[in-house]
Every structure is written in C-alpha cells, then in structure tokens.
Amino acid sequence: MDAREHFHDLLASLRPLLRAGENFTLDYRAEASEFVRFNQARVRQAGQVQQAYATLALYLGERHARFELSLSGVAEEDRSRLRHALERLRTVVPALAPDPYLRLNREPWRSESAEPGTIPDGAAVIGQIVDASTGLDLAGIYAAGPQYQGFASSWGALGWHAASSFNLDWSLFHANGQAVKSAYAGQCWDAQAFARRMASAREQLEYLGRPARTLAPGDYRAYLAPAALDEILDMLSGGFSAQALASGGSPLQRLFAGSARLSPLLTLDERIDGGLAPAFTSEGPRRDLRLLAGGLPGERLVGSRSAAEYGLSANGAGAHEYPLSPVVTGGALDECDILSRLDTGLYIGNLWYLNFSDRPAGRLTGMTRFATFWVENGRLQAPVNTMRFDDSVFSFLGPHLEALTREPEMILPSGTYGARQSGSRTLPGALLGRFTLTL
Amino acid sequence: MFESTSALLRQFAALRSRADFWSLRHVRELGEHYRVRRNVALPPTFSEDSGAMLTVRIAGVEAYAATSDLTQAGLQAALERAEQMARALAGHALLEVHELPVPTGEADDVAPGYERPLAGPAHWYEVLGAESARVPRDARLVDWSAGLGVHCVEQIYLNSAGACLRRAQRFVYPALSVTAGDGHDSQTRSLGGFNFGQQGGAEVVDRLGLIGAAPRIADEALQLLLAPNTPGGPLDLLLMPDQMVLQIHESIGHPLELDRILGDERNYAGTSFVRLEDFGRYQYGSPLLDVTFDPGRPEELASYRHDDDGTPAQREYLIHRGILQRPLGGALSQLRSSLPGVACSRACSWNRAPIDRMANLNVEPGDRSLEQLIGGIERGILMSTNRSWSIDDARNKFQFGCEWGQLIENGELKGVVKNPNYRGISARFWRNLTAVGDADTVEVLGTPYCGKGEPNQAVRVGHASPACVFKNVDVFGGAA
C-alpha cells in the first residue's frame, strides 16, 4: 500500500473510535531502505528493510499516554493493531495523574511536502561503486530509499512529508592505515557526480602516503573543515533546549547567563527553507529561529512542555528541543586561502567521538580522524597521527575563532540507529588561532 | 510466551525458495517506560515492535530482507527480495560463506522469572513518585528524576536445516539522577549513570538499590557543586564498578571485536590496535587481569544460550593472567580469521543483521576488599559513575570522566572533588592494574546503548566487575 494512503487509512479508522472527551495525536514513520556495506571495495553485507511505525497518544483532559507500535503495511492488520493500542491506552490513562505541563498546540494546521528522488536500483549502484573503487581499499555504506513522516491530531493538525534519498558514506584507506572520508548524498544519483567525488578522494589519498607526523600535546593553529565543525555543532545543539538551559544540562548555560561569550563571527539559525527536515514536528509547524546572533545568545528552543514548566512561549521546536536544520552563516575566508591563512598548523578533516570534559564550561574532548594534515607555510606537509583535543568552545570558538569560510556546506546525516536519520546541517569551515591537543 | 511459534513454523514451512539455505529470525519486543521528574509524573510510553529478518545463501553469497509484514505473502516477498539481492551481489561479494556452519536442533532459552508478571503503571508511579519526593527541598537542586524501563523480548529463529531456537528475556532499567546548579556550574549525580540495568523482574529495582537512594544522590550532587576541581597530575586511580563498566567496554571490549580487526567497521566504529597475530601471546594487562565472555550469569544483560546466528554460547577467557587469548568474534569472523572466538553474533532487533558484538564481558574478581584497595594507595583518587567517554577509532587513546571523585591520601578517603577525568592509552593502561577487588566489590551492570555497525545498531551488553586500582594515571579536573 502507498505510504500516504496507509497513513490516511489509519487516521480514518481511528477517528470513529474516539469517545466523548478523548483526543489523539498520531505520528507515522516509514521507510523502505536498501543497505549495502563495503569492506576492501567489495560488498561485506547487504539487505533491505521495510518498516513502518506509528505512535498513538491518547488524551483525556490533562491525562495522557503514548503507544508506539510497528505496522505491517497491511491495512486491515494495522487497523486492528491501532485499535488494540487505543484500548490498551484506555485502560491506563484514566488512572494517571493530570499532567500540569500539558500545553499542546491545539490549532488546526496543514503541511504537506513530497520530494521524489531518482535512485537507480541497488545492483546498478553496487556495480558502479565496485568498479570505481577498483584497486582501492574502500569501506563504507550505501543507504537508499523512500522515507515518510506523518502527523495528525483530533484537533485538526495534518502533516505529511515524503522524500526519497540516498547516502553513500565511505572511506578510502592507504596501506599505511591513514584514510580519507567522503560522502555522496542526495535525491538524484548522478553517476558522473559520484565519479568526481571518488576521483577527489583518490587524489587526497595520495597525500596520505607521506610519512605521518606525530605531534606533541600543546596549542596549535588549526582549520576545522565543515565536517569537523559539524561534530562540534552536534555537541552544542542540545544546549539551546529551554529545558537543558533551565536544568543545568546545557553546555551553553554560561553563554545564556551572560558569563561567557562566543566569537561575533558566529551566527546560527534554525532554518526551514533549504533544509531537508519536514516543516513540522509533533508540536506543530516549525519556525525559523535565530539561535546565535553575532556570538550572542538568541532564541532558545522551546517546546510546549518547557513553555508550561518555565513560563516561556513555545516557538515551534519539537519536543526534544533540538535544531533539525541548523545553518551557520558563512564568513569572509575564501576556500583558496585556507592553507595560506592557516600558515602553519593542523588541517582537520574530521573529528570523532566527542564528549564533554566539563559540560557547564563548554569544554569538549574528541579525536582527529580521517585526512588530518600538518601544514607549514601554507602547504600540506604530512598526515598527522590521531590526536586528542580538549578545549572549551568559549576559547576556540570565542576569541580564537579567526575566520569562517565564505560558502557553507550542507551535510546530510548518515546515522541509521533504528531508522535512517533525516534533516541537514549547513556550515562553513573554521580557522582557529588556538586549538589545544592533549594526547 | 512464544505465541507466534505455531504460525511462524507453518509459514516458514510454506515458504518457497531456490536458495541453498535460508533462515527467519522473528523478534517481538514489548516496552514500557515510566518517569517522575521534579515530582511530576510524565506520561507513560508503551511499545510493541515485531518483524522478521529473512536471510538467504545462494552460491556462497548471503543477503537479507527484513519486514514487519508477517503475513505469508509478506514473508515470501521478503525472502524473494533477499534472493534477488544475493544474486545481484554475485561477483561483488567480499565473503564466500559455503563453509559457514549451519545451526540445527531445537532449544528454548527462557530467562528465570520471565513469566512472573510485573506490577502495572499505578504501582511504578507510586514507587517512583515516592523516590522523587525523597529529594530534599533546596533551591540549588534544579532537576531530578526517577524512572523505570522494562523491555520483554522474544526471538524465534528458524532455518531450512530444521533449527528452532527460541529465547525470551526481560530487561529492567531503573534510573535516578539529581542535578545541583547555581547558575554558573551544575553537577549531576546518578545511580549508575548510563550503565544500569539487569535481566529479571521487580527484584532488579531492589537489587540495584533504587528505593531510598534519592537523599544520598541529592546530597552527593550538592557536595559536588561545592567541591573543588579535581587536581591535575599522575595519581593512583581506584575505579568503582560503575566506571569499570565503561573502562572494560571501551578499552577491552571494542578492541577485541574481530570484525573491527578484519576491517568491517573502519568507516564508522573504527579499527583496533589489536592485530590478528596478537591472540595467544600479547600482554594486554598485568598478570592480575582476567577477562571472561560469560553468557551464563542470569541477571546480566547479555546472557543467552545461543547468539543470533544460532551458535551455542559458553564461557571463555578472553584475557587470562594478562595474556590475550581469543577475540570477540562469531562464527563468520572465526571462519574468516581462522581464530577461535565466542558466540557473539548479535543484532539489535529484527531489522538489523547480526554482527560481532560484545555480550557479557566481565573482569573476574581478585582478592582485595575495598578497604584494602583504598588502604594500599598512598596518593590517589577514587572515581565513580561514568559521565563522559571518548576514545580513538583504534580504541587506544581514551579520555573518560566520572560524576564522583574522592581523593585518597595515605590509605584513607579524603575530600570530594568535582569533574574527575582521566586519560590514557589502552595498550598501556591495563598493564598498570595493581590491585583487583574481591567478589564483595563486584557489581553486575551493563548498558542498552552500545552503538556500532553500518547500518547502526544499539545493543544491550553486560559487564560485571570488581573495583580495581591502576597506578600512575594522568588525572585532571574541569575548567577553572
């Protein structure tokens, strides 16, 4: 059954079951995914996954509960599963305590979008990847197929988002163990575009053949490529949550309290247009929000629950209060000037495995990984063996942020825990005057 | 229990395939989650997830298709998609699986007490509400919550060689945390952090000490808020079991995963500093270090009789007296490497394929009481409850942080310190193991969030460990 039809069939079956005083919300997520993983430029493991899930929430005044259920895709069976979930919730909800922070968006709204893609069948893509990596040591994963998200409520909300996409995330390894990471993601597979990316990765691989340099711990000038800055932004993203800021869980609490500052070069928006996330969440339509303005704190991400708990106004953030398509404004550094402006220091292609060494202080640690080079006098010298950094964002993205590149790059997430991750992040590279390595 | 068995057996028998071998792995998982935050009961969440993975082998090539459509037509369609994929891979596949053993036989693996019913939501909200209410009123206590997650998982594995392997498990995850903050700094203290859960029933809540713990946890959060930063420098380090869990997991478990050593994970989870030729000879730790793969401890999160490929599981030493013995590799990795392994081919659910994973990975107890461990330290620090973890892609250079630190001077516990962090290199760290706690110091813990694989999978792993002492570790605190 067509996914949109499936979603509407579930909705149609649910509405007549409602009793007086009952309300519902219904989330729907489905995907048909092809997963092919590679090792040594051959297929290590491959398969397909068809899955669909619904989350039904039942509201009885201020009392409510949720039931997440897998769907078979067979209409009659799924109507029965949904009815069973509703009946289960009815046995629980009346006995629950009223929820003092239930402030759902009860306005009717509609949002619908569909982004059809052009994706060749798996066999053709596998053939192209294997052919293009002949003579190379490639490891990675190709994930592709349609994804669907729906949301509806008994108060008249209706959202639908369909997109078909692919994401090839791969690394090429040199015999010395050094590697370059690449990604090719989008909605229309273009064999020539893929070939260009593979050629670019192959070119970088040649640099990795030089003897690697081991650095001593200390402070270095550094350039963070967009993929590396993306890892930093990922760690900070939860810090804009109103709940995290109110409950001591935000790495940006000192920024919002006015006792720490970020560089005036940093402006960050949660922007719907151009991003690949749906324009709605289960809280309703999303809004454009300026989260950082010239290094100063802007809006918090406020879901309806935090709004009720902390006396704030909800602003279209989802219940998790996390930016879904953040955009960091570009700066004045031209791509062609990156190495000359860096002069002597580290070119960091990717960072890996970040965590907090002191969250309230905005202090992070993590590793360099993939295509990290030592640069002298504006020229790449040698790959650098893996190093650990430990530094505060209020330092390296504060007074030590010297420049951002002019053209931000859109990065599509390759995560597949439970389901293929959607959304996007758009950000430039960052030139740092000081970045602290510790191990 | 196993309600789907007869239908699945009938459906499996009716499947038509031209594959050399095919299998079906059906998983049904029921979940319920309750939480009380700042004395307000959050709405409960219930879940039910079921589906099946069909795997085929054709001319030595393996492929899978997973579906939540469990009708005969749905399973047949999935089987045909898997066959189509396997044929498309001909000439492109890395592995040839002709020689891979095929499980046979029938076995039921039902966790003790699985069928004993648990109390309903009203009971758990009462328990959690009472615990939340035990947090004292103090304006500096800005957040706290008590929670409980329960997951029941039933798996049925069938294959064309006649195997029928069934497993039923229940996982219980109590949670308690309190955050103290003053607008500038904040410190969180919890019961076990992210590494807290066991198999069983209501007794897990008692056994792990949730009830009555809130006042102590809140008091410790306040102590941390007022405490000085951890001093920097080399110190002897006493790690309590709720940090040993993380230390074992990251710097023994992951490096010993055979698929990492064979390169499968190089694009995501990473590689390993351990090489194939290291098994049987490499000095991983001091002679005090004994590490076992132990699937037989009933309450531990990853106890089972067969892994998800149907290989029988048994206890094995991975490290004995400090010497590396065997890797964490399932049947396929053993075939690829010609090394002995363990039954650890595991999947997170029906929609992901099994790969090499940790299961129960334990440090065996030594002979020192906790008092003796502390008494043997002249200048050191006790660290408890993991809160931060980071390690390089070869699982060598690590930096870990804990919630709770307490200085040790001349064999005695002294003042509390906040932001206790330490860093080191796996290949050297375990060789500095100087004392191992006795059985009285052992705790059975684990996490449901071990991430790995492409596509990504988070699985449950168990770790039982005594408290341990490491000499001369690079310790440091947070920002000033």
Image (spheres, rainbow, N blue to C red):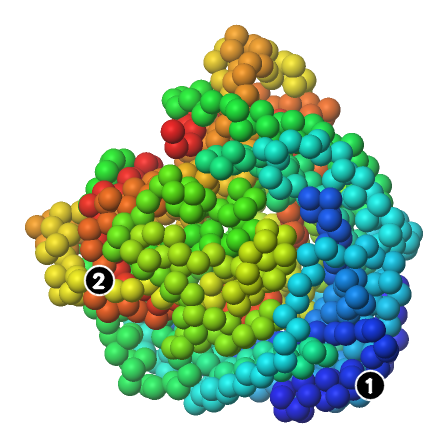
Q: Nearer the viewer, residue B404 or A263?
A: A263
B390 vs B12, left or right, is: left
**Mark 1: secondary structure:** helix
Would residue B68 be seen by someone viewing this image from the given angle? Answer: no
The location of residue B399, given as percent across then percent down, is: 44, 38
Q: Name the kind of residue labelled 2 in the image.
A: Gly
Say which residue appears at 69% left-offset and 40% top-offset. B176
Could you say which quadrant of the image residue A339 lies in?
bottom left
Q: Position of residue B89 (x, y in %)?
A: 50, 81
Residue A407 falls left or right of residue A425: left
In the drawing, what numbered circle is on residue A331?
2
Q: Is residue A4 left or right of residue B427?
A: right
Q: Amino acid at mark 1?
A: Pro
Q: Quadrant of the N terminus of chain A?
A: bottom right
Mark 1 or mark 2, which has the lower sequence index? 1
Residue A53 picture location, percent across and down: 68, 74
Residue named by callout 1: A16
